[in-house]
């Protein structure tokens, strides 16, 4: 495994600026998640580290050494894509073994057999080794795709939204599996997603990208509790942070244009009167959709609440987040 450092990395495709002056360190053994909407620069970052594209400016260093002159194979990184990228005519065993039989690695067959068996055990698919790839479920195919990266034991694993094409239950199952694999291997992961749940549950560090710029980097808890802007605050949290005019509950602090309210920032029981427009019972939690005056917000309450749509409650903010007219935290 290795530490990966990006220094002032920039990349444009024609007139489109994909990355601008990105500096970030991916610590050895960390699980770093890059978070942002489509077009934020997440996949471009992976491609520059992998050597599939060259930066216009800046440097990529792995274990302290610049790899800009190295080919993708020489960089010793493994990439997992959103699509499964399996050979349908081969068995699971041969799909897993394929990278180890390449001229760059050329591992002896007895070692390949051991390594494939080890990875199959990690992925909990040893009973599928002799199946054709086409006979697998979607979740099993993605496990094999991840396994093709794991067999190589590279310096860093690069993962480009590998779970986004799966259904909700499989995504939840594989989130747990990926975190377990990371902990078991002590490997370095850089994982790209727009799914905030994946970021909160798997990451040791989160990098938030906005139009090619890295706007904040820290632990999931730091990003959630101390976002530098309303944009960053909206990247994490379920339900999404409520962003209202700063004077929605009375006089705001100086220079405040918006008040940011997460569920824990909303005290129910006193304050302004709000009508319950809708209730969502989600099993482990209940979401209240509230309206007061021209404003609307969503918060959480007891899973077994007796409240009903049409009733009213009183709410007040408690330690909210404040943002200025440019969206910056104040």
Image (cartoon, rainbow, N blue to C red):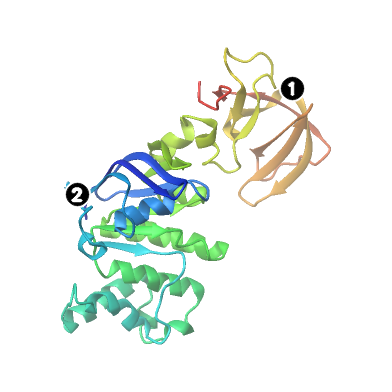
Where 32 falls versus 155 (above or below)? above
Q: Name the residue under label 1.
A: 272
Disc 1 secondary structure class: strand
Q: In this view, does 64 lie to the left or right of 320?
A: left
Query: Is the C-beta separation of discs 1 and 2 under 8 Å?
Result: no
Where 150 falls versus 213 (above or below)? below
Horizontal and vertical percent position of residue 70: 20, 58
Residue at x-position 58% and y-position 14%:
253
Horizontal and vertical percent position of residue 43: 42, 54
> In this view, which residue lies farthest toward the right?
310
Where does the N terminus fall, quadrant-wise? Answer: bottom left
Horizontal and vertical percent position of residue 301: 66, 39
Observer-nearest of 32 and 303: 32
User: On residue 66, which mark appears?
Assistant: 2
Q: Is residue 243 left or right of residue 220?
A: right
Where 136 falls versus 66 (above or below)? below
Q: Distance between the residues labelled 1 and 2?
A: 58 Å
Disc 2 secondary structure class: strand
Query: Label 2: few (<14), some or many (≥20) within 10 Å?
Result: some
Residue at x-position 21% and y-position 79%:
112
User: On residue 215, which mark appears?
Assistant: none
């Amino acid at each position: 495994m290795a530490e990966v450092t990006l220094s002032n990395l920039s990349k444009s495709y024609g007139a489109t600026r994909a990355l601008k002056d990105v500096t970030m360190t991916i610590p050895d053994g960390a699980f770093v998640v890059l978070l942002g909407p489509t077009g934020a620069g997440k996949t471009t970052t992976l491609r520059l580290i992998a050597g599939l594209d060259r930066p216009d400016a800046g440097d990529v260093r792995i274990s302290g050494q610049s790899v800009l002159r190295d080919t993708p194979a020489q960089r010793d990184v493994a990439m997992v894509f959103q699509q499964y990228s399996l050979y349908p005519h081969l068995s699971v065993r041969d799909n897993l073994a394929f990278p180890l039989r390449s001229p760059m690695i050329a591992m002896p067959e007895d070692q390949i057999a051991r390594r494939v068996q080890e990875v199959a055990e990690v992925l909990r698919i040893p009973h599928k080794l002799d199946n054709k790839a086409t006979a697998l479920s979607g979740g099993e195919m993605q496990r094999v795709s991840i396994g093709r990266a794991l067999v190589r034991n590279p310096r860093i694993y690069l993962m480009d939204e590998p779970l986004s094409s799966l259904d909700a239950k499989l995504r939840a199952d594989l989130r747990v599996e990926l975190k377990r694999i990371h902990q078991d291997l002590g490997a370095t992961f850089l994982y790209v997603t727009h799914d905030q749940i994946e970021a909160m549950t798997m990451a040791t560090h989160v990098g938030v990208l906005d139009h090619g710029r890295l706007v904040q980097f820290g632990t999931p808890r730091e990003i959630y509790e101390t976002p530098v802007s309303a944009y960053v605050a909206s990247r994490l949290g379920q339900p999404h942070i409520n962003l209202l005019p700063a004077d929605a509950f009375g006089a705001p602090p100086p220079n405040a244009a918006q008040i940011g309210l997460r569920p824990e920032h909303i005290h129910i029981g006193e304050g302004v009167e709000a009508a319950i427009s809708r209730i969502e019972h989600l099993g482990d939690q209940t979401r209240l959709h509230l309206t007061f005056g021209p404003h609307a917000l969503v918060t959480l309450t007891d899973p077994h609440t007796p409240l009903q749509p049409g009733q009213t409650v009183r709410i007040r903010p408690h330690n909210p987040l404040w943002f200025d007219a440019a969206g910056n935290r104040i």
